[in-house]
Amino acid sequence: MQQWVFLSVAIVSEVIATSALKASEGFSRLWPSVIVVVGYAAAFYFLSLTLRTIPIGVAYAIWSGVGVALIALISWVFFGQSLDFPGIVGISLIVAGVIVLNLFSKMASHT
């Protein structure tokens, strides 16, 4: 169970860092830039802890898939970026892929 907590922390850290990347304005603003660096460092650290027990293909698929979906949602809610029907379908397919991978794939067998 701990590996899923690590993976969740990695995902949240990456999403926070990516969201702050826009506010850093090319690393010209100090605090958003600090958030980016610390966020990505935490994301990779916790992802590395996850890889002790979850296969890399599964962990990375979940990390990147959930991260993409969350960033798209945050961009829509906080940055006013449009999210049209094809975008919603695409994000839904990414999330569905992560679910299928976890529930049905032998690749996800671990521990």
Image (spheres, helix red, strand yellow):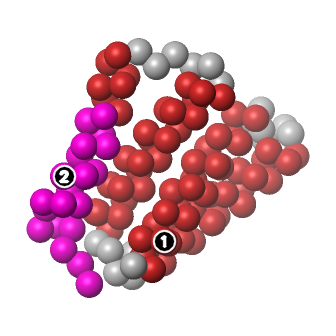
Say few, some or many: other residues with alpha carbon within 10 Å of mark 1 (under 14 / 14 to 19 / 20 or more). Answer: few
Q: Is residue 9 magenta?
A: no
Q: Residue 56's quadrant in the figure?
A: bottom left
Residues in magenta, as a range: 92-111
In which quadrant is the C terminus drawn? Answer: bottom left
Q: In the drawing, does residue 99 fall left or right of residue 106? A: right
Q: Main secondary structure of the magenta part?
A: helix
Q: In the drawing, does residue 65 fall left or right of residue 41? A: left
Which amino acid, by three-letter code, is at mark 2?
Val
Q: Report x, y in % for residue 78.
A: 65, 28
In which quadrant is the N terminus drawn? Answer: bottom left
Q: Give the vertical position of 40 relative to 55 (above or below).
A: above
Q: Give the vertical position of 57 relative to 93 (above or below).
A: below
Q: Report which residue position mark 2 lands on.
A: 100
Q: In the drawing, does residue 105 fall left or right of residue 6? A: left
Say few, some or many: other residues with alpha carbon within 10 Å of mark 2 (under 14 / 14 to 19 / 20 or more). Answer: few
